[in-house]
Image: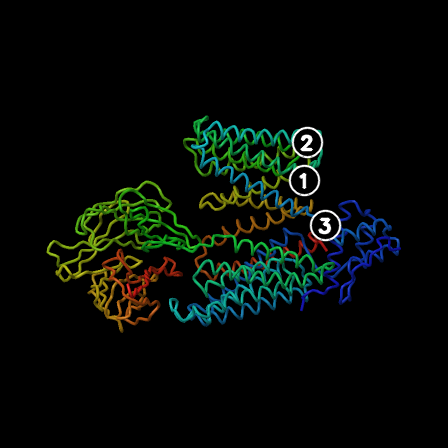
Amino acid sequence: VRAYSAFSQEALRARDLLKDWAGEGFLTEAQYQRMGQETVCELRRTNIFLRLVLLLFTLIIVGAAVALFFVVFLSQPAMQATGIFLLIVAAFSYAAAELAISHGRLYRYGIEEALAACSVGFLCAGIQASMFSGHPYSLKPDRAEFLVPATGAIVSLWIWHRFGLPYASLAAMIFVLWLPGYWTSSHSAQHLIVAAFYAVGLLIVAAVRRRHRFTYLNDEYSIAEALLWLGIYLAINLQLSSVNLLGQLWGWTADSKAVLFQSNRNDHWGIFKQSLNEDTAEPIVTGSEDAYNPRISPDGAWVVYIVRPREAGVSAPVQLMRIPVSGGAPQSVMTAYVYDEHRCAKSPAKFCALAEQTSDRKQLVFTAFHPLKGRGRELSRFDIDPDPNAAYGWDLSPDGTRIAVFKHSDGRIYILSFSGQQPREISVRGWNSIQSVDWAADGKGLFVSSSTPQGADLLHMDLHGNAHLIWQQKGNTASSTQTGFGGPSIPWAVPSPDGRHLAIYGWSLSANIWMIENF
Amino acid sequence: MRSSGRIAPHPENGDYMTIFTRLEQWNERDVISSEQHTLLAGLSRREPFSLFLELNILLYAGILAFVTGLGWTVSTWSQQLGDVLVLTILSALLAACFWYCFSRAPAWSSGETHSPNLAFDYVLYLGSLIWSVELAYLEKRFHMLSGQWDLYLLATASLFVFVAYRFDNRFVLSLALSSLAGWFGLTISRWPSHQDAAYRQYAILYSLMISGAGATLRRRGLKPHFFGTYLNIAANVLFWALLSGVFNREGYFVWLLCLLAACGASLSWGLVRRQFSFVAYAAVYGYVGVSAILIRDMNSSTAVLSYFFVTGVAMLVMLVQIARRFGREA
């Protein structure tokens, strides 16, 4: 099953050894030349620099060819069609790698390595797109989606075995890292599962290697064994504690690599940023005042947030502040009577928006503000129920052209357009107690949470009211107007700016009841 | 004659010759002597088992980890430890490292000299890195040069050049050249009317200067094997500087011509001297520069992708031809 004959690879090994021995002075030049003539093999190798450049240009060719095919023939393809096409490309890439070896006799030449790497990448992307892209936020695919990294790991192992590329075993190990995430949310369990996989691999490799101690395969298995030992060490020694955040999710950084949340550590509400790859959060605002509602500015450079004095009521004016995303000195943006909270659009839009209630309590006035320049023009108005118990929520669309507004515990959402069109009413089909609304990253839908008799549901809804369930939280929950400070609150979801991730805020509480008898 | 007294291992499926079989045959045909056969068969069996690579990796990683930990400790605990204690410890470590190097090093020679032992080079790296930590600490705590970091870099570059030549160490030489490049950059940033273009010109000057210095030193027989280090750093700085000119919207044509000339020089140097890193530089930097110009005004994604496909194939064919003619290993 190996692409290269044992004779060829042993001859290459002999040549390498002869070169080393000649360099060390164990062989004379004449001996080296004569022995070299007897170890000639038909495989073509090149030096490391040309190998790397050949690999780079092969990747460019394959990438450009695939993208060109998409642009010319599949301008707006369905995801499943995309997936099938990628699977075909993967098969072609693999066949091309085989051909480069069988006909071109290439050995560590860069070209066949790039083709083999492309085949793995396209295969995984193809499986992901063709089998698990029914709906980007659907719950269903998650259960079987582990097949993607599992296939990646198996095919990488096959390429390692067939072509003898040492880094293919490393690729397989990296694919294995993703597997436990589909089975358990516990970080400790994930680490242990990965370590268990590596340990099994180590046992197999060590057993096989014993039979090849003096052949050309020894080095290949040695590298794999060393990588597995290293993997086990890292898997069980890296931090085993799970993420422990007591905070509320509000937004993402502009690069979609970190979430922003508020947390009441050290007896004060502060603002924190946590990268998706990290287990710990980085403080951004941790002053003596309570800071809430972090939102990223449209240009991605600032975190815009609210400072509300603790003794002031919810109807008191608040200070809107800004602070650089990387940390620094907070600066004031403006003071306002902010209703609910502020929101920010995404670049190329340049503004954030806030809602203020008119003095007669009959309207919400939406006003733009610039994180650096302060208050801007009025965007829209919306008639509301003046009853003090009636609460409203809203969100600004990512392109800054519309606002979605709703009454808490109602089943309708209103879309206000800034271009003068009449407000549009959308009824959420199947749910009638809306608690939060957040625009999807593409502006073509909304993430909506709704109370239910069993708890709360998180939905993705298009702009025609067609909703489907993406998250369910069972048990009693507090309304989002109570913002969960005192107990489990409804979940809500904030999509990343690139639309590839969905951060879901959830709060669950479990307790035991003890019954004591005969006291 | 089987002087080793051992039976050479054969593969179980033995349809090919292992190195042991080959050595036996060469020994029987008197291509190699019995002593050579014994030695080489032992080496093939990894007897003695070499830990050279593993020890080098561990030493290198250990030095990096130690210096990182030292820097973290000093920056975190300087208030509690006190300046005197911190500086005493750093100075003592620095002195110990350089005392070790000076006491163990072979006599200076203008030619290539080898390290007296495996640990020597790593003690030298440790000393060099501790020097950097101590300088950073002095500036942070005492602002001795009022934030004139460029002078620290110049002093560091000078020290590292001396150390590199005294102990024949290319790694320290590359640290010296990097520090010198940093000095250039920081100095320019202090100029009141500095512009990005100034960086480009001085980067070119820097690369010409260090390649000239390397060539002069080589001609004079002063560590001629260092020339490759000078040339690799100079080539990369030069290519980056020229590329930054090519990326300009205006006046890029001159820079493109310079880039093409540099690529031609790098390619021919690499092929003639069989230093294929220079062939790689020419191919990659040249391709990036020319592509930047050609796709600059292309609005159609089809055209851009077609360009990458066609030129990628052309580059691949050319590189395969080069690899076949010049870069063959087996």
Q: Nearer the viewer, mark 2 or mark 3?
A: 3
Residue B104 against residue B59 in the figure, above or below:
above
**Residue A281 x, y percent position in the rendering:** 39, 50
Question: Do tags 1 and 3 sit on the same chain?
Answer: yes
- Of the residues shown, which amino acid type is indicated by label 2? Arg
The quarter of the displayed image where residue A36 is located: bottom right
The reply to whether the C-beta atoms of the residues labelled 2 and 3 are less than 8 Å apart is no
Amino acid found under the numbered disc labelled 1: Leu
Chain at tag 3 = B
- Label 1 neighbourhood size at 10 Å, few (<14), some (14-19), many (20+)? few
- Tag on residue B104? 2
Label 1 is found on which chain of the structure?
Answer: B
Residue annotated with mark 3: B49
Answer whether labels 1 and 3 touch (C-beta < 8 Å).
no
Residue drawn at x 65%, y 30% as measured from the top left: B166
**Three-letter code, disc 3:** Phe
Q: Which residue sits furthest left?
A: A360
Do tags 2 and 3 sit on the same chain?
yes
Seen at 28% across and 45% down, the residue is A372
Quadrant of the image for the C terminus of chain A? bottom left
- Asked if residue A446 can be seen in this view, the reply is no
Indicate the secondary structure of the residue bearing disc 1: loop
The numbered mark, 2 or 3, whose residue comes first in the sequence reads 3
Q: CA distance from mark 1 to mark 3?
A: 16 Å
In the picture of the structure, the residue carrying the numbered disc 1 is B118
Q: Mark 2 or mark 1: which comes first in sequence?
A: 2
User: Relative to residue B272, is residue B209 depicted above or below?
Assistant: above
